[in-house]
Image: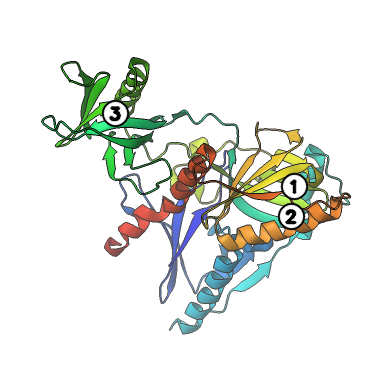
Amino acid sequence: IYPVYSAYTTSGENKPLIVILSNTTLYITGFKPNNSYCNHFVLPYTELNTVLIGPNAQTMHISNYDNDMQCIITTGSENVTNELIGQMEMAMRRDINKPRLLAVKQLNMRDMANLRRIICKQTSITKDEEYFHYSIVNIQDYNSDACETPLGPSKEGPLMFKTSENDTRWETAYFILKAGILYMLSSPSQRLPMRVLPLINGACQGARRVYNCTRPHTFQVQVGTITLHLAAPDEYVASEWLQALVHAASKTYNHREKMPAQSCSLLMTSEHILTVREAFPCTLSSSLALREQHQPIKGAQALSCAAISDITAFRLPCAEQSWCILEFACREVHESSGDWILYFATNAELEKFISTLEMLWAYHNEQDDCFPISTIPETDSLSRKCVDTYNMIQNTWLSLQMNLKSF
């Protein structure tokens, strides 16, 4: 069983999937909006013919003998792809039906003539530049507005609280409202919440002012049997919090809401680093209810491009997580308006990217400066934003894994 993704659409959306290898059949399985399982691609090993592996083993194109059963999946990880191919071959050897072994072809950037031609047409990259890196990542705009999300407002800050109306003792905590959930933490640096209160889907019975309280600027939130009394430092902050809580409670969760980061292809040449949205054939996304969101284009679309020599900062998290932030002195702007926050599938993929980038940056650095790598503090608001997005991406298979026994 391997967690993978569908090939992203031209809007950067994809779906979490699971590849299941039985004793006779390959299954690619996902889930419906009600979290029930659904097979999106089923192919007996006797009909499995070829697998085309994309550059740096980031994608897999699976096909039968008649070429009328095809799908593209992305792993974002060379290790996962290689292990999956190895297990497929082993399963076919053990199949009692004795199928012919599949043909496997590994592509590289020299094989991607159409992609290279479009990149040269849309950016300042020349046809003579050599390609050193290719990976499937999630990208988030550094300057995107995080105050409002599809699931309601985001807000955070310290508040006084108590959980009983008869309790005379007030305590201090740090509260974070995000995606319709209110988190209560002991301090901003703590990531493990003391309480988690869902407000969406009717979980919140109400939020209102409390006027007859000994402490001013007080309001309360009713979630199930829990009544949480909160107090702000002034009337303005209390009003902001109350409006945000009421707004968040009125939302209904929708699996189709847009993720804060979208998928794209990340490439590096001898001179440039760029993000591209490729036009993968829509072979699987139609069955994933994405066809109406998939806007056909004639080819790949360059999102953003920068000279490697213009990188001014490379920031990594304190924790062992596979994301990074790139800042530039200048660059060619297309769809993305800020610097880049990149989320890789694994730490191994991030480390390969860093190694290649450091090598190319040093080659272009005439002043013999050190590569501008640094660690972003956990207490930094941008770091917390990135950690939240990273955890959201990592947990996309959670529903699949939790219900796997019922499959």
Task: Tell me the quarter of the image containing the N terminus.
Answer: bottom left
Q: Position of residue 230 (x, y in %)?
A: 26, 28
Residue at 76% of width from left, 36% of height from top?
Answer: 329
Residue type highlighted by circle 2: Leu
Task: Quickly name the residue at label 3.
Answer: 249
Task: Quickly name the residue at label 2.
Answer: 357
Disc 3 element: helix
Q: Earlier in the sequence, mark 3 or mark 2?
A: 3
Q: Earlier in the sequence, mark 1 or mark 3?
A: 3
In 3D space, how far apart are the residues under numbered discs 1 and 3 (Cα atoms)? Answer: 42 Å
Which quarter of the picture shows residue 244?
top left
Task: Quickly name the residue at label 1.
Answer: 273
Question: Mark 2 or mark 1, which is nearer to you?
Answer: 2
Task: Tell me the quarter of the image containing the C terminus.
Answer: bottom left
Q: Earlier in the sequence, mark 2 or mark 1?
A: 1
Q: Position of residue 147 (x, y in %)?
A: 47, 28
Q: Is residue 84 above or below residue 170?
A: below
Disc 1 element: strand
Neighbour tally class for label 1: few under 14, some 14-19, many 20 plus, Cα within 10 Å: many
Q: Position of residue 290 (x, y in %)?
A: 48, 41
In 3D space, how far apart are the residues under numbered discs 3 and 2 (Cα atoms)? Answer: 44 Å
Q: Position of residue 94 (x, y in %)?
A: 46, 83
Residue type highlighted by circle 3: Ala
Q: Which mark is residue 385?
A: none
Disc 2 element: helix
Q: Are marks 2 and 1 in contact (CB under 8 Å)?
A: yes
Residue type highlighted by circle 1: Ile
Q: Is residue 13 left or right of residue 170?
A: right
In 3D space, how far apart are the residues under numbered discs 2 and 1 (Cα atoms)? Answer: 9 Å
